Image (cartoon, rainbow, N blue to C red):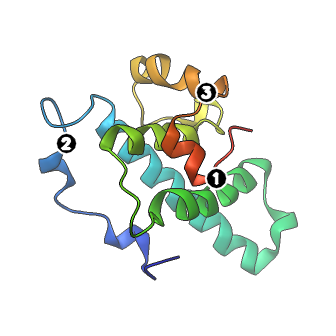
Amino acid sequence: MSPPIDVLPSLSRLKDKGIGEGKTREDHSDIFNQLFAAYARGKEAQELAVILGEAALSEADRMFFNFADKFEAGYVSQGEYEDRTIEETLDLGWQLLSVFPTVELKRIRPEWIEKYLPRFRKGEKVEAVAESGISSS
């Protein structure tokens, strides 16, 4: 990852002051919270795999394990000259989360899931998602 950082403790404590009505899209807070939770669970699964081996992981653990790698590669490791809008970044978050069954999206309000998730489940990609190398399958 470039730059080499530990993502979990590095997330902004100021994020609550920069998101919300009139500042960013309505789903921003929920997406942030769900991405953070899924990434934390993925890192836990990766640590468990080091101790027990990947074969010992449940199907759900493997899903989160893989999510953590894709999150780091396509979301956190934004290129130095990559200029994503907030909308592109939120859509990239939805694309990443689209691999999970809806039941796993516990931190996103049902109305945002209904409004945003279907287009990513159908394979629609926004430009930032396509450029990130994250596939919809």
Looking at numbered disc 3 in the image, what kind of residue is underneath it? Answer: Glu
Residue depth check, mark 2 versus mark 1: number of the one nearer the observer = 1
> Callout 2 environment at 10 Å: few (<14), some (14 to 19), or many (20+)?
some
Mark nearer the N terminus (1 vs 3): 3
How many marks can you see? 3
Circle 3 — which element? loop
Residue 115 place in picture, x, y as percent: 44, 17
Looking at numbered disc 1 in the image, what kind of residue is underneath it? Answer: Gly
Residue 70 place in picture, x, y as percent: 62, 58
Looking at numbered disc 2 in the image, what kind of residue is underneath it? Answer: Ile
Mark nearer the N terminus (3 vs 2): 2
For the residues bearing labels 3 and 2, Cβ distance under 8 angstroms: no
Of residue 61 and residue 11, the one placed in the foreground of this image is 11
Mark nearer the N terminus (2 vs 1): 2
**Residue at numbered disc 1:** 133
Residue 13's quadrant in the figure? bottom left
Q: Which mark is residue 19?
A: 2
Residue depth check, mark 3 versus mark 2: number of the one nearer the observer = 3
